[in-house]
Amino acid sequence: MESFIDANIQTKKTKSSLLYIKYIKLYKKLTQT
């Protein structure tokens, strides 16, 4: 059960970091123009 929760947290972390990277790329694109 603990490992399942750990894995769930890891997925949430990776999902949020991917979203974060997406926003940074979008921001850079907007600031370049």
Image: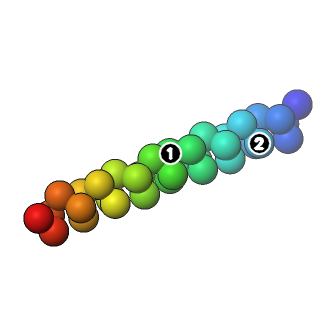
Considering every residue shown, the one lying at the far top of the view is 1
Identify the image quadrant of the N terminus: top right
Mark number, residue 16: 1
Tell me the quarter of the image containing the C terminus. bottom left
Instruction: Measure the alpha-carbon separation of dots 2 and 1.
Output: 14 Å
Q: Give the quadrant of residue 28.
A: bottom left
Residue 8 on image: x %, y %: 71, 37
- Element type where label 1 sits in the image: helix
Mark nearest the camera among 2 and 1 is 1
Q: Amino acid at mark 2?
A: Ala
Give whichever of 13, 30 is nearer the camera. Answer: 30
Q: How is the image coloured?
A: rainbow
Image coords of residue 17 (percent x, y):
50, 53
Residue at 40% from the left image edge and 53% from the top image edge: 22
Q: Position of residue 32 (x, y in %)?
A: 16, 68
Q: Residue at x 45, y 47 (%)?
A: 19
Against 32, residue 2 (above or below) is: above
Left of 24 or right of it: where is 17? right
In the rendered structure, the answer to whether residue 5 lies left or right of residue 25 reads right
In the picture as drawn, the residue positioned furthest to the left comes out as 33
Q: Nearer the viewer, residue 7 or 22?
A: 22
- Read off the residue under disc 2: 7
**Residue 32 disc label:** none
